[in-house]
Amino acid sequence: MTVNIHNSKLAFILALSDLNNPLNESEKHILIEMGKQLDLQPSLWSDKMENILIEMIQSNPELNQHYTQYKSQLDNLPDISENLSEIDQELKSLMVMDNTVRTRGFKPTNQPTGYDSQINNLVVLASRSEEPETVVKQVSSLDKLKQMLGHSGQ
């Protein structure tokens, strides 16, 4: 089975979880806007949105380095569905237990119907946090995926 997933978003989330330095205010603003768009209409992920994400990533050398590594590895994998199967439960627990996530807005309204939706919801969840890097570091399924990719993280 092939997973219909936008590797750019997943590579971004993985790279974000490896950051040693927090995103700056401009990067957080871009992430917030992306999260809003993904929450309102996840099926409208477009080249324009992806280009905005790529520009943001390229402006941050550390994020860009991690992103490039993950994107390359993900593009060469035929199927990663088994490694993403636990994300749904982790997202639900983060939405319930983490007050810093809830302070910036409502939890994502889209129900995860596939792995792409789960990644969208993770981007939305991170976008609503004061510290998006911290939120994605709490998703242990990402660590398992990193191990599969042969990347130990930071």
Image: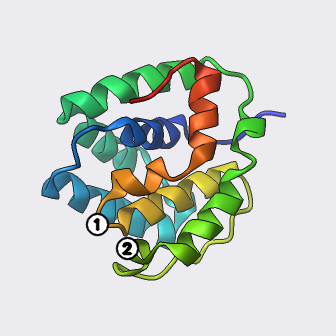
Question: Could you say whether the residue bearing mark 1 is in a helix, strand or loop?
Answer: loop
Q: Position of residue 85 (x, y in %)?
A: 75, 47
The foreground one among 97 and 3 is: 97
Q: Position of residue 54 (x, y in %)?
A: 31, 37
Residue 65 visible in image = yes
Classify residue 81 as left or right of residue 119.
Answer: right
The three-letter amino acid code for the residue at tag 1 is: Glu
Res 154 quadrant in image: top left
The three-letter amino acid code for the residue at tag 2 is: Thr
Q: Circle 1 sits on which residue?
A: 130
- Residue drawn at (15%, 55%), measured in percent from left and top? 26
Question: Could you say whether the residue bearing mark 2 is in a helix, strand or loop?
Answer: helix
- Residue drawn at (38%, 54%), measured in percent from left and top? 134
115 over 42 or under it: above or below: above
Q: Position of residue 61 (x, y in %)?
A: 20, 28
Q: Circle 2 sits on which residue?
A: 100
- Residue drawn at (31%, 57%), measured in percent from left and top? 31
How far separated are the C-alphas under marks 1 and 2? 7 Å
Classify residue 1 as left or right of residue 139.
Answer: right
Residue 39 numbered tag: none
Dot 2, how many residues are within 10 Å of its Cα: few (below 14), some (14-19), or many (20+)?
some
How many numbered discs? 2
